[in-house]
Image (cartoon, helix red, strand yellow):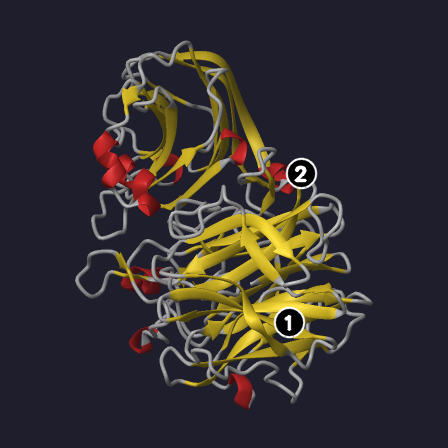
Amino acid sequence: MMRVFTKMFWVIALVCLFPLLDNINGGGGGVMAFHKEYIHYQLTTTNNVDQLYRTGYHFQPKQNWINAPMYYKGYYHLFYQYNPKGAVWGNIVWAHSVSKDMINWIPLEPAIVPSKPFDKYGCWSGSTTILPGNKPVILYTGIIDLKPAPGHQVQNYAIPANYSDPLLREWIKPDDNPIVKPTSENVSSFRDPTTAWFNNGHWKMTVGSKHNKRGIVYLYRSRDFVKWTKAKHTLHDKKDTGMWECPDFFPVSTQGTNGVETSALMGGIKHVLKVSLDVTRFEYYTIGTYNTMKDKYYPDSTSVDGWAGLRYDYGNFYASKTFFDPVQKRRILWGWANESSTTAEDVAKGWAGIQLIPRMVWLDPSGKQLVQWPIHELKTLRGEKVHRRNVKLNKGDIVEVKGITAAQADVEASFKFSSLDEAETFDPKWSKLPAENLALEICGITGTKQGGLGPFGFLTLASNKLEEHTPVFFRIFKTTDNKHKILMCSDAKPSSLNKGTYRPSFAGFVDVDLSKKKLSLKSLIDHSVVESFGEGGKTVITSRVYPTLAVGKHAHLYLFNNGTETVTVDRLDAWSMKNPLLMN
């Protein structure tokens, strides 16, 4: 019988450093510097954990605040940052859970805890690499001193105590750590070693950093995975982007949806570099070319390299990490969503942070962006189903989707329209808005106000009289050069009557040909999270919401249109979602 470690308190992430929302000082809901420790909250967890906003089918701890995923001998392993003493940032160790399907999860003992001089003050972010002979190794950031804040950072490694154990319960941190120490680098901004790759007789890895305002991924090489030498140049860097956390560098195939392993170079390959931005608390990625002779990465001219670049997710999403699944030949993306409630509320409910549903990720046929979609294993949780065809939505129409559990659901719809003539004019003044937040700003300005072609989509987690609702929708604009811009929004502003929560409007543009006059939308709804996928996963937005009325059986799901152009729901499929049999 499998023994599980059940007496853990939980705080969750994906082994990267995560933000908290600081509503204590001033109550404004701004994003705080996540490294701040709330000492006075550390041991104040409650035995009566608030279940109101707990997710049903997302990976989440039983209690307290919750990165490196991999596949090994029949199990998916998820290592994630965890605070054993409270639902706030601090006391970070590497917790460890395993799964056969990335849906049902069994918690094990923590894999790494601070215990040596090279990680005395914390075991921070990192990654896993599978070495020849199917031997996994962990690379992680250790904190050797609390000063300078948020800590003096070095890079360490750990190896399994028993390679024959498919659960990898015990890990050893060799005494020859640290394997990488900062020399001229910023010692307090030097973290998150990537999954390593191999070419030209060397293993390569990067470490995220900054110099002044320049974001950097330093490159290191090793023949034996223990002795590492810093390259004379960076793998990549960019001015005015700030600290680059949680870098992820991986290849994608230019043909089809299959993933390729991290060292792949042959057969039609592009590379992706993703970084998490410490300054803005969102991520961006570029698609480009990796020159193996120079060990340099060059973004394509079609990829914006900076804050206005492409994002996996335009909402509540950070510290993401991908891994290659060798069994199903796919690349899987994991992302983390922090709470939008106050720190005091997190402590009161006893937990904070969730992992989002794992997503398969691949290169769009255009070669200009990535596409994402929830892993197919999620379908095993589908229960009661509602199917509708040809639902006509005139201006102002709101149609309820009945017959499912609206607080815990999976809904997909295809919307069609007969003309683009009603599309609103894209206001030229909007071009003066910050490029990195252009879609978000427009969504905040227009919301679900009456438009031309849109807004249309879903009203999720809605109360009976719509005092609370989280709309997820499209809105189509016509530009001065007679082209069209498709805005996708997930607007949390009307999501809750609790004004103390952070309720932002999140949005992104969808790059799609409208010649067929169709758009598709999918939302995964799970009590306090709404993950939405526009046009087959070209644009993805996640919102964390905390309704006070639209909870449990009192939550409703609606289709809506508030544009002058009539929209028809060509197809609607919605399912109640069951809880996994095993969830930590």
Disc 2 marks a residue whose amino acid type is: Thr
Could you give the CA–CA distance between mark 1 and mark 2, rounded to whole angstroms? Answer: 28 Å
Image coordinates for residue 170, horizontal then vertical, percent: 68, 76
199 or 54, which is in the foreground? 199
In-image side of 322 versus 441 (left or right): right
Q: Give the amino acid type for the residue marked by disc 1 in the picture.
A: Ile
Residue 293 appearing in the image: yes
Q: Is residue 469 above or below residue 266?
A: above
Q: Is residue 113 left or right of residue 561?
A: right
Residue occupying image coordinates x 52% and y 74%: 93
Q: Residue at x 79, y 65 (%)?
A: 134
Within 10 angstroms of label 2, few (less than 14), some, or many (20 or more) residues? some
Q: Is residue 530 visible?
A: no
Numbered disc 1: secondary structure: strand
> Is residue 449 shown above or below 500?
above
Q: Is residue 371 left or right of residue 211?
A: right
Q: Quadrant of the C terminus?
A: bottom right
Write down the residue under mark 1: 138
Residue 241 placement (x, y as % from top left): 38, 60
Which class describes the residues within 10 Å of circle 1: few (<14), some (14-19), or many (20+)?
many
Q: Nearer the viewer, mark 1 or mark 2?
A: 2
Quarter of the image for residue 195 reads bottom right
In the image, is residue 261 above or below residue 452?
below
Earlier residue among tags 1 and 2: 1
User: Which residue is painted at 39% across and 70% down in the image?
Assistant: 89
Q: Disc 2 marks which residue? A: 257
Residue occupying the far left of the picture: 26
At which x and y percent is residue 270? 63, 47
Q: Quadrant of residue 78?
A: bottom right
